[in-house]
């Protein structure tokens, strides 16, 4: 089945460590997105990529980094510079920028 | 900022139609109305979208007013599994746009037996 896979579902890290969240899609979608969700809140855009080897900052990019070396993959690194990294992270993709976004089931990151 | 306004919560009886309203009074001519829902601890699920005509699919119907300033998502026969947060989003489309979605707070729909 085609879809978006985020792994792991739960991730625990110590403060001061960088951590990379995986997002893989086999839908042949060009555009990919990373969102963050805090309890009781809507989703906020971190980074997005419309094509391989290109990406742009979203509304809350500080403390995060991404890469897009392959069409299928868009990993997100949460760096130690991110002040409040504990959150639910969601990856999404779409075939073109005018087609619906499809979301993965998220990674819940806890930093202590 | 999100360009939509939704009630924070609504209840619906199981088996009845759920009508979820959304105001988007500043919508532009090239912006579509999208609806997603999110069940707790899962990723948002796409439901339906439209520009100005009413739309229907296997999940729901979308009614957009003639002036496009508001819309209503209709779940014709709500079930307990439809309990979720429903997001109404306006989205700029076109090849020169990013395609990103800007989420608001959504409406928490509680379907009751």
Image (cartoon, coloured by chain):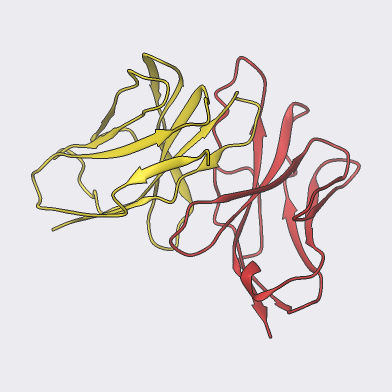
Chain colours: A yellow, B red
Among all residues in the image, which is located at the extreme front?
A: A1
Which residue is pictured at 63% across the width and 16% down the height?
B95
Residue A17, percent from left and from top: 10, 43
Please tell me whether residue B80 is drawn above or below residue A107 in the rendered image.
Answer: below
Among all residues in the image, which is located at the extreme bottom?
A: B113
* Residue A23 visible to an observer of this rendering: yes
Which quarter of the picture shows residue A46?
top left
Which quarter of the picture shows residue A111?
bottom left
* Residue A59 visible to an observer of this rendering: no
Please tell me whether residue A87 is drawn above or below residue B93 in the rendered image.
Answer: below
Residue B21, percent from left and from top: 75, 59
Residue A54, percent from left and from top: 39, 15
Please tell me whether residue B9 is drawn above or below residue A3 in the rendered image.
Answer: below
Instruction: Please tell me how many numbered marks the rendered image carries.
Output: 0
Determine whether, in the image, residue A74 is placed left or right of residue B108. Answer: left
Which residue is pictured at 91% across the width and 42% down the height?
B66
Observer-nearest of A27 and B27: A27
Which residue is pictured at 60% across the width and 23% down the height?
A96
Residue A97, percent from left and from top: 60, 25
Q: Quadrant of the C terminus of chain A?
A: bottom left
Observer-nearest of B75 and A60: B75
Among all residues in the image, which is located at the extreme right?
A: B66
Which residue is pictured at 9% across the width and 52% down the height?
A14
Which quarter of the picture shows residue A71?
top left
């Amino acid at each position: 089945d085609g879809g978006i896979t985020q792994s792991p579902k739960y991730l625990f890290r110590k403060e001061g460590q960088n951590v990379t969240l995986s997002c893989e899609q086999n839908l042949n979608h060009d555009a990919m997105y990373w969102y963050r969700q805090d309890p009781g809140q809507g989703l906020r855009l971190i980074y997005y990529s419309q094509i391989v080897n290109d990406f742009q900052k979203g509304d809350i990019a500080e403390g995060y980094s991404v890469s897009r070396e392959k069409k299928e993959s868009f990993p997100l690194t949460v760096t130690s510079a991110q002040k409040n990294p504990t959150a639910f992270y969601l990856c999404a993709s779409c075939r073109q920028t005018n087609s619906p976004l499809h979301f993965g089931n998220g990674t819940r990151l806890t930093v202590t | 900022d999100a360009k939509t306004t939704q009630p924070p919560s609504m209840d619906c009886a199981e088996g009845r139609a759920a009508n979820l309203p959304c105001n988007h009074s500043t919508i532009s001519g090239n912006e579509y109305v999208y609806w997603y829902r999110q069940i707790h601890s899962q990723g948002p699920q796409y439901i339906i979208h439209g520009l100005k005509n009413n739309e229907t699919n296997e999940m729901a119907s979308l009614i957009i007013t003639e002036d496009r300033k508001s819309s209503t998502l209709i779940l014709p026969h709500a079930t307990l599994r439809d309990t979720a947060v429903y997001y109404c989003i306006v989205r700029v489309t076109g090849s020169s746009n990013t395609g990103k979605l800007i989420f608001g707070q959504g409406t928490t729909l509680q379907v009751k037996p």
